[in-house]
Amino acid sequence: MAAGIRRIGQIAITVGDVDRARTFYRDVLGLRHLFDAPPKMSFFDCDGIRLLLGEPEPGEAVRHASILYLDVADITASHEQLAGRGVQFDVPPHKVADLGDRELWLASFRDSEDNVLALMSEVPAG
């Protein structure tokens, strides 16, 4: 493989307030918190990929992240659970593609720092 790259090992999201973001990712999304590190960084496990939430360096602006697509087994149940925790969905669960024997469904929302995230699920065609 070119350059020896095997997989994504870590994804970083710049946040305006790491304490607020930690609470959202840990308590609302339910990701497993790994550790915090100075200055103002918090790390989570997302099935073997480390997610870093960190405040920008002094003098730098907060940059919004690429969209993180969070794979779930049951998008309807996950949507209901997160909505029950106060997550405001921009777009509710809906089919975006027919993949033959299954369908791709998405539902988008924003985190505590206004970054776009989405639930995704491949469900049996029907």
Image (cartoon, rainbow, N blue to C red):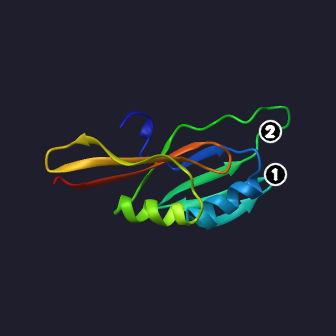
Q: Check the picture and name the quadrant holding the C terminus.
A: bottom left
Q: Residue furthest right?
A: 58
At x 63% / y 36%, what residue is drawn? 64
Instruction: Specify the amino acid type for callout 2.
Output: Glu
Of the pair 88 and 56, the residue shown nearer to us: 88
Residue 116 versus residue 73 in the image, above or below: above
Disc 1 element? loop
Image quadrant in which you'd find residue 115: top right
User: In the shown orientation, is residue 106 left or right of residue 64?
Assistant: left
Q: Position of residue 102 (x, y in %)?
A: 19, 51
Of the pair 115 and 42, the residue shown nearer to us: 115
Mark closer to the chain start, 1 or 2: 1
Instruction: Specify the amino acid type for callout 1.
Output: Pro
At x 56% / y 46%, what residue is drawn? 11
Q: Position of residue 113 (x, y in %)?
A: 68, 46
Q: Residues within 10 Å of mark 2 (few under 14, many from 20)?
A: few
At x 85% / y 37%, what residue is drawn? 58
User: In the shown orientation, is residue 52 left or right of residue 71?
Assistant: right
Disc 2 element? loop
At x 52% / y 62%, what residue is drawn? 82
- Spatial CA distance of label 1 from label 2 is 9 Å
Image quadrant in which you'd find residue 21: bottom right
**Total residue callouts:** 2
Image quadrant in which you'd find residue 79: bottom left
Residue beneath disc 2? 57
Q: Residues within 10 Å of mark 1 (few under 14, many from 20)?
A: few
Q: Check the picture and name the quadrant holding the N terminus.
A: top left
Numbered label attached to residue 39: 1
